[in-house]
Amino acid sequence: MPDLILHHYPASPFAEKIRALLGAKSLAWRSVEIPMVMPKPELTPLTGGYRRTPVLQVGADVYCDTALIARVIERLHPSPPLASDLTAMSDFALAHFADEHLFAAAVAYAMQPQGMEAMFAGMAPEQVAAFAEDRRKMREGGSAPRMPLAEAWSVLLGTLARLDGQLSDGRRFLTGEAARTCDFACYHPLWFVGRAGALASILEPYPHLRGWMGRIEAFGHGAPEPMSAAEALQVARESTPGMLPGRSLREADGVVVGDAVSVSAVDYGVDPVFGTLANAEPDAFSVRRTDPRVGEVVVHFPRIGFRIRAA
Ligand SMILES: N[C@@H](CCC(=O)N[C@@H](CS)C(=O)NCC(=O)O)C(=O)O
């Protein structure tokens, strides 16, 4: 089976979601460290312009967004299972809430000056200013402005208490004895809060929640092995994009397979990716494109949170 290649950087909460999930499955994977801010000249030849973190590469297939990345890892490595038909909707709904709202609240809360100081300790002031400017620009044209701090407090306090309550009967994970995708989705925003210096004390009153965070942390990250960005580009160049087995081609949203399309995130980081619609599944779009540095690749996006248009 081809390597799982994760393009990410250590401080990224969404990357931590996937690193922890790879840990829960005890998987070996290749780790390509990417810049925290634009430009990302060794990533965008693969994605066609999508700039968010993380991105999963499998040969010449490139998977954007952790909702899709989690499903792909589950499909390729089903054991131990992190998804179950019996909790499918509650898992999906909780993960969606966490990735959208809990993450937005965690960012607004943790990026207060004290939190920034803890997280960016040792970084030059110009680098911190460049980071803030990059994130301001990333929100341009998107539907999700930064969450106001007062709202972030409300989301955090309401959510922490409920998560703690849900874990208070002694279960190991949010929906029972086994970890599900929703565990990793709720974990990563709180992992980020936990790194925000004194602001992390917001987690203290919740012992069940802290115990659960410890259990996810204990999964570790599997077995990452560093890979250079140049090597990852070479892997793409030397591979042929594959279609995941058992998926049929169908029409989607006024465009059909073979049409020129653009796909962009709706909320932030909305840089469009142009190509030819290669596949449309109930929950994902796939766009075929070529780049002089990688040849032909197929870039996959989840439907939810992304918009497809004729180009
Ligand atoms: N919905 C996306 C969100 C990803 C996201 O917001 N990632 C952050 C880092 S945690 C990001 O891309 N920040 C800007 C960057 O890394 O360039 C996902 O699930 O992958």
Image: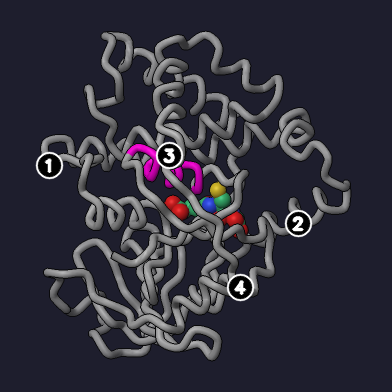
Q: Magenta segment range?
A: 15-24
The kind of residue on which mark 4 rests is Glu
Q: Nearer the viewer, mark 2 or mark 4?
A: 4
Residue positioned 64% across, 69% down in the render: 40
> Which label sits on residue 20?
3
First in residue order: circle 2 vs circle 4 = 4
Asked whether residue 76 appears in the rendered view, the answer is: yes
Real-space Cα distance between discs 2 and 3? 29 Å
At label 4, counting other C-alpha atoms closer than 10 Å, the crowd grade (few under 14, some 14-19, many 20 or more) is some
Residue identifier under label 2: 133
Name the image colouring: one colour
* Residue 43 x, y percent position in the rendering: 57, 70
First in residue order: circle 4 vs circle 1 = 4
Mark 4 falls on what kind of element? loop
Mark 1 falls on what kind of element? helix
In this rendering, position of residue 88 left or right of residue 134: left
Residue positioned 50% across, 42% down in the render: 16
- Location of the C terminus by quadrant is bottom left
The kind of residue on which mark 3 rests is Ala
At label 2, counting other C-alpha atoms closer than 10 Å, the crowd grade (few under 14, some 14-19, many 20 or more) is few
Mark 2 falls on what kind of element? helix
Real-space Cα distance between discs 4 and 1? 38 Å
Of residue 159 and residue 287, the one placed in the foreground of this image is 287
Real-space Cα distance between discs 2 and 4? 21 Å
- Location of the N terminus by quadrant is bottom left
First in residue order: circle 1 vs circle 2 = 1
* Residue 173 x, y percent position in the rendering: 30, 24
Real-space Cα distance between discs 1 and 3? 22 Å
- Residues at circles 1 and 2 in contact by the CB criterion of under 8 Å: no
> Which label sits on residue 42?
4
In this rendering, position of residue 115 left or right of residue 239: right
